[in-house]
Every structure is written in C-alpha cells, then in structure tokens.
C-alpha cells in the first residue's frame, strides 16, 4: 500500500473508526494496521478473501463519506497548521524579548497551543 493512502486511512479511522461495527473494525485493523493478507483475515473470520476485500473497500467508502459530511480531518489539519504558526511566532517573540514577564506569558501560549493539539 502507498504510504499516503495508509496515512489517510489511519487518520480517517482515528476520527471515525468508532462508527464502524465491531466486525468491520476488527477486519479493518487487521488489514490496514497489522498488514495481514486478505486470505489470512478471511481464514480467521470464516469469510472469503473477496469478502474481506469488499469489506475493506466498503469501510474506506464509509469513512470517506463521514469525512465529506463532517470534515473533522480537514479541520484538524487546519488547526494543526494554525497552531504551528502560533508556536513559531511565540518562539520568535521569546527570542526577541528578555522581559521575564513577557517570556512567561509566551510560554503559556506555547503550552496552550500544545494542549489544543493534544485534545484531538
């Protein structure tokens, strides 16, 4: 699998995976994250290789449809970019100022920006 596709699947799964059934999640995780073959998973689950393939395609479609409607991954990426800009500006301000009170406030901003990303 292409690295970009795996990253996309991982991101979509992180945001929307809980909306899949337990059966879908188990098979999706085995194929995408455990790098098992369709045949291996099919044997474990008692379904055909084609059944596993179809389920993965269906899950990909479901996850993409959630993203089309909710745009959580897009919003996360935008937030991440904005936080990175804030952190860069804060670092520049910290370098340019020796005032300890101002440096303390800048460090608070940096901490808050890290917390914003951790909430995702």
Image (cartoon, grey):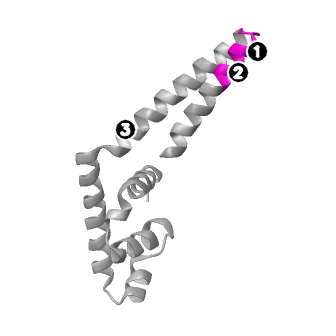
Q: Secondary structure at mark 2?
A: helix
The residue lying toward the viewer, choosing from 111 and 9, is 111
Residues in magenta, as a range: 97-107
Residue 75's disc number: 3
CA distance for labels 2 and 1: 6 Å
Which of the marked residues, 1 or 3, is nearer the chain's N terminus? 3
Say if mark 3 contacts mark 2, CB within 8 Å: no
Helix, strand, or loop for circle 3? helix
Q: Which one is nearer the viewer's eye here, 47 or 87?
A: 87
- Point out residue 70 in the picture as x, y percentages from the top left corner: 27, 46
Q: Nearer the viewer, residue 85 or 7?
A: 85
Can you identify the residue that label 2 sits on?
Answer: 104
Q: Give the residue at x 23% y 53%.
A: 65
59 is higher (above) or lower (below) than 75: below
Residue that mark 1 sits on:
100
- Numbered-mark total: 3
């Amino acid at each position: 699998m292409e690295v970009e596709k795996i990253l996309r699947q991982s991101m979509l799964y992180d945001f929307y995976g809980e909306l899949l059934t337990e059966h879908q999640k188990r098979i999706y995780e085995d194929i995408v994250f455990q790098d098992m073959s369709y045949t291996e998973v099919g044997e474990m689950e008692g379904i055909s290789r084609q059944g596993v393939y179809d389920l993965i395609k269906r899950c990909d479609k479901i996850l993409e449809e959630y993203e089309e409607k909710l745009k959580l991954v897009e919003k996360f990426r935008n937030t991440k970019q904005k936080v990175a800009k804030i952190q860069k500006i804060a670092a520049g301000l910290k370098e340019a100022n020796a005032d300890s009170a101002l440096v303390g406030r800048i460090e608070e901003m940096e901490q808050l920006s890290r917390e914003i990303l951790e909430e995702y």
